[in-house]
Image (cartoon, helix red, strand yellow):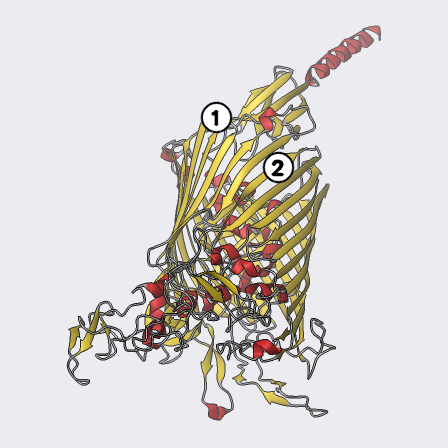
Amino acid sequence: MKKLLLVSLCFLVLCITQVSAQSRTVTGTVLASDDGLPIPGATVKVKGTTIGTQTNSSGKFTIAVSPSQTLSVSFVGYTTQDVSAGGSVINVTLQASRRELGEVTVTGALGVKRQAKELGYAATNVSAKQLTEAHPTNFTNGLTAKAPGLVVSTVNNGINPDTRFTLRGNRHIVGNNFALVVLNGTPISPNEVSTINPDDIESVNILNGAGAAALYGSEASNGALVITTKRGSSTGTPQITYSNTYQLEKISYMPALQSKFGGYGGEGAPFQDPVTGFITTTAPFENQSYGPAYDGHLQQLGIPLQDGTIQSYPYQSPSGQSYARRFFETGHSDQHSLSYSSGDAANSFNLTAFRLDQTGVVPKDKFNKTQLRVSGTKTAGIFRADATASFSQNNTDTYGNYGDILSTIYNTPSWVPLTNFKDPTQPFADPSTYFNSYGINPYWSINNSRLKRRSDVMNGSISGTLTPTKWMDATYRLSYNGGSYQSQNTRAQINYSAYALSDPTGGYSTVGASYGTAVNPGTVSNYSGFGDGSANIGYGGPQGYNRIQQDALVNFHHSFVGDKLKANLLVGNTIWQEYANVVTNGSNNLLIADYYNVNAILGVVNAGQDTRKIRQVAYFADLTLNWKDWAFLEGTIRNDHDSRLSAANRSIYYPSVKGSLVLSDAIQALKGNNTISYLKLRGGYSQVGDVNVDPYSLISTFNATGGFPYGNLGGLSQSTTLNNPNLKPELTSEVEVGADLGFLNGRINLAATYYNTHTKNQTLPVSVSPTTGYSNTILNIGETQNTGYEFKLDVVAVQKTPTGVGVNLSGNFSIQNSKVLSLFGDTKQLTIGGYTIATTKAAVGLPYSALYVNDIMRDDQGRAIVNATTGYPIANPNQVYAGQTTPKYILGLTQTISYKFITLNVTEEYRAGNVIFSQSLQAATAAGVSAFSTSSDRQRFIFPNSVINTGTTANPVYTPNTTVSVQDGALNFWDAGAFYSSGAAYVSSGAFWKIREASLAFDLTRFIKRTGFVKRASFSLNGRNLFMWRPKTNNWVDPEFANSSSNGDLGVNSTNQIPPTRIFGGNITITF
C-alpha cells in the first residue's frame, strides 16, 4: 500500500511538471512586412489543436503553449507563417500574400460567400480603403474607374448630385438600366446610395453580369453592387475611430465665353448707323451680346432710377476672371464620422454616427446628412444572430426649379458686374430697376426661388442562422427599407413699380415678360412621399418604394468519393413587398405674398395622389459541385411570381449554369510554379428577367379631367394609353467566358472576360390609330444585343518594405458594344428623349442610344449647301445620325507609391467612342456670349466648306462657294436660320481624360507610443476631379454630364448643368 502511494505521488509530481510545461504563457506582437505596423485581428493558433486567439488592436496576443509546439499565425492578405513556441516573447512579421488569388472571399448573390476560384463569372471586390482614398461624400464616386465594366457618371455638379451607375452598358430601351444595389443582403433603390456613409462600408462586390446576380431573379438583369457594412471588431478589444474630412469645391473649367462684344439684340434704331446699318451703340438694357466691340468708355447700364440716378460701368470685360466666373462661390464640405466597435471571434458590435454639412458653388445652396448605424452579431453554440439598423436624414436647400442659373448668366453681357447686384433689395438689383429687360437678377432668383427637400430613410435587418449538423445550416432574414420624403418648391411674388412699367427709356416694352405684367403672384409646389425617401415611382426608372422582405435559406453541404467531390445545395424562398404613396399639391396664384400655404391661394389647388404596391414571391435553388478544389460547377434556378403581371404570365423561371477550372491546381506541372502562379478558366450561361411594368398597368383606367371638379360636378376621362393585360417580363440571356491568371508568384494578376447579352420582349410604347380612342399601347417587342470585353490588371512593381519603396499599379479596360436588333414590325426608330433639334433614339442596326440631330443640307462629299443669294446654309428636313451617346471605351488606372509611412495614390479615367449634344452651347450662342458666336469676329464670311447649286433642282451641280458671304455674321446668323437650328452645330466628341482622385497619406501610427491611448493615426491630403482633358472640339461642357440619369437624357446636356468643379481637402483619422 505504501509502495502504491509512493508510486502515485511520483506520477502526480510528473504530471504537474508536465502540465506546468504545457501551460507556459507566451506573449508577442504580429507585424506587417510592408509597413512594419501591428496587425489587429490576426489569428494565432497552436498548430494541430483547436487552441487559438486573436491579436488585439495593438497587434498583441497572449496564449498558453508548450515550448515543443508550433504557432501558426495568419491574416487575410498575408502568407500564413509557422513559428516555434520556444521563447516567452514571440514577435511575428507576416509577408503580404500575392499568390492566393483564388482564395479571396467574394460576397455574391443573396450574401453567399465563396472563394474567388469557385466563381464562374466576373466579379470585382473594392475594399473600404480603395473606396475612401479621396473621401467622397457619395460612395459610388469612390467606385469610379476601379472596376471593369462599371460606368459611374455624375450627371451634374452642385450639392448631393445624382449619379448613374451601369454595368456592361444599357440593354433596356425604356426600362431601368441601373445596376441592382444590395445593402447587407437586401436590394435598395439606386436613389438611396447618397444616404450611405462611405466610411461605414467594409467592401463592395461588383457582380458584372446577369449570371453573377441570377439568384436575384427579375431584379438582376443589370448586374449588382453588393455592399457589406462594417460589423465590429474581432480583436476582443474595444476600438473607437474618429474621422474628419474637410474639402473645398471650386469651378474648374468655365465654358469658352467671348469677351469682346456688348449688349444688343436686334432693337434697330437708335443703336444702328442709319446708312451702313452697323451696330454703333450698345443697348444698355439688352440681354444678348451682339452689340459693338468693347472700347472701355464709361457706359450707362439699364434705366435710371425715378430720381434720375444712373449706374455706369466701363464698357469692357474685366481683366482676370470673368464676371460670370466670379458669380460662383467656393463650396465647402465638412464630414465627421465616429465609430465604436468591439467583439471577438464569435460576437461583434458596431455603432457609427456620421454628419456631413455642405455648401455649393451656387450661392445659398446647402446640404446636410446625418446618419446613425448600429450592427451586431452573437453566437451561442449552434445559433448565430445578426442584426443591423440605420437611420439617415438628408436636407437639401437649393435654387428652385423656375428657370436655371446658367441661362441667366448667359443672358448677361460680359461687361455687366454681376456680383455688384448680390443684394436684390437694393436699387438697380430689384426686379423693377434691374438692367435686363428680358430677365431677372440671378441673385433675386436665388433668394426668392427655393427648392427645399428632406428625406428620412431607415433600413435594417435581423437574421438567425442555425447549424444543427456539420452538413446543414438554415438562415432566416427579415429586412426593412423605407422612409419619407417632402419637398417644397417656391417662388416669391414679383411686383413691378409703376415707373418701370412706364417704359421710361423706350426700350423696356418687354419688361416683366418672363414673369407677368404689373404683379406676378408667387407659386408653391409641395411633394411628399412614403417610400424609400426618393419618392420616384415613375415608369421605367429606379423605384422609390418602402420595402419589406423575408429570406429563408437552407444550405446542405456534403463530401463524396473520399472528400474528392464536395457538393453544396442552397434552397430558399424570398417574399418582398413594396409600397409607395405620393401626394402633391400647389398653386401658381398665391393670395398673400411670400406665404407659401395652399390654404391661402386664389382659384383651385392643383393636387394629386399616386399609391402603388408590388409583391413578389420567389423560390430558388443553387447547386455547386467542387471536384478536388480545382473544378467547379454551379447551377441555379429561380421562379418568380410578380403581382405586376397577370395571373397567366406572372410565374417566370430563370436558369443559369456556370463553371470554372483552376488549371494551376489541376496540372501537376503548374503546382508551385512561380512564373504562372495561377490559371483559371471560367464561363457560363444565364437567363434573367426584368419586369418593366408599372403596378396596375394591365387594364385601361380613367383619370381626373382638367377643370374638374366644376362646383359639385366631377369629371373623368379615359387614359390615352391602351393597356395590355398580356405583358410579360423582358428576358436577358447572357453568355460569358473568361480567364484569371497570376504571374511571378502573384505579383502580376490579369483577368479577362468576354460577354454576349441579348434582351428581348422589351416593354415599349407603340402608336395606334386615333380611331381606336387611344394614342398608344404597350407591347413586348424589340431586342437589343450587348457584347464586350473586360480586362483587369494588377501589378506589384516594387514590393513594399517598412523602410523602402513600394509601387502598385492597377488598371482596367472595357469595350462596350450595343445594337438595337429590332423594334416593332417595320418601325426602325423610337424616340426616347432629347430636344426638337437633337433627339435620342433606339434605332435598328445602331448602338443604343443613338443621337439624331437637325442638320444643314450637304452634298455627297459632306460639303454644306448654301443659298446662292444669302450665303446661309439650307436646312435639311430630316434628322441625321450623329453617334452613340454612351462611351464605347472605358479605361481606369490607379498608381500607388509608398515610401516608409507616406503613400501617394492617383486614379485616372479615360472614356471615348461617344458624342454629346450641348443645348447649353446653343443657348449661349443665341445669347451671343459663347466664343463660338465670334468665330467670324461678327463679320460677314463665306460658310466653310460650302457649295452652291449651279445646276437645277432636278439635276443639281454643286460648285465650291468662293464668293457668296452670309448676309450677316452676327445676330441674324447665330440666333436665327438653319445653322442656329442645326443640332449638328452643337455636337462634339464625348471623350475625356480625368484625374478622378488623388491622395497623399501619412500614416502616423509608427510615431505613436504603442502603449498609449491612441492606437493608430493618419493624415491625408486628397482631391477629386482635379484635372480634365477634352478634345479641342469641346471647350464647353463636361462630357460626363447629362440632363438627368434617365435613358433619354444620355449624351444630352443643358443649362441645368453648372460648370465642372474640382474638389480638394484633407482628412485626419484617429483610432483609440
Q: Which residue corresponds to the image point at 36% horizontal and 63% vertical from the top-left?
A: 293
Residue 516 vertical placement versus 995 (above, below): below
In the drawing, does residue 778 fall left or right of residue 837? right
Quadrant for residue 701, please give it.
Answer: bottom right
| Secondary structure found at label 1 | loop
Q: Which mark is residue 1069?
A: 2
Residue that mark 1 sits on: 801
> How far apart are the two marked residues, 2 and 1, measured between alpha carbons?
23 Å
User: Nearer the N terminus, badge 2 or badge 1?
Assistant: 1
Q: Residues within 10 Å of mark 2 (few under 14, many from 20)?
A: some
In the drawing, does residue 944 fall left or right of residue 971? left
| Secondary structure found at label 2 | strand
Q: Position of residue 400 (x, y in %)?
A: 59, 66
Q: Position of residue 214 (x, y in %)?
A: 51, 58
Instruction: Name the residue nearer the viewer: 770 or 269.
Output: 269
Q: Return the residue found at the far right.
A: 1
Viewer can see residue 1037 = yes
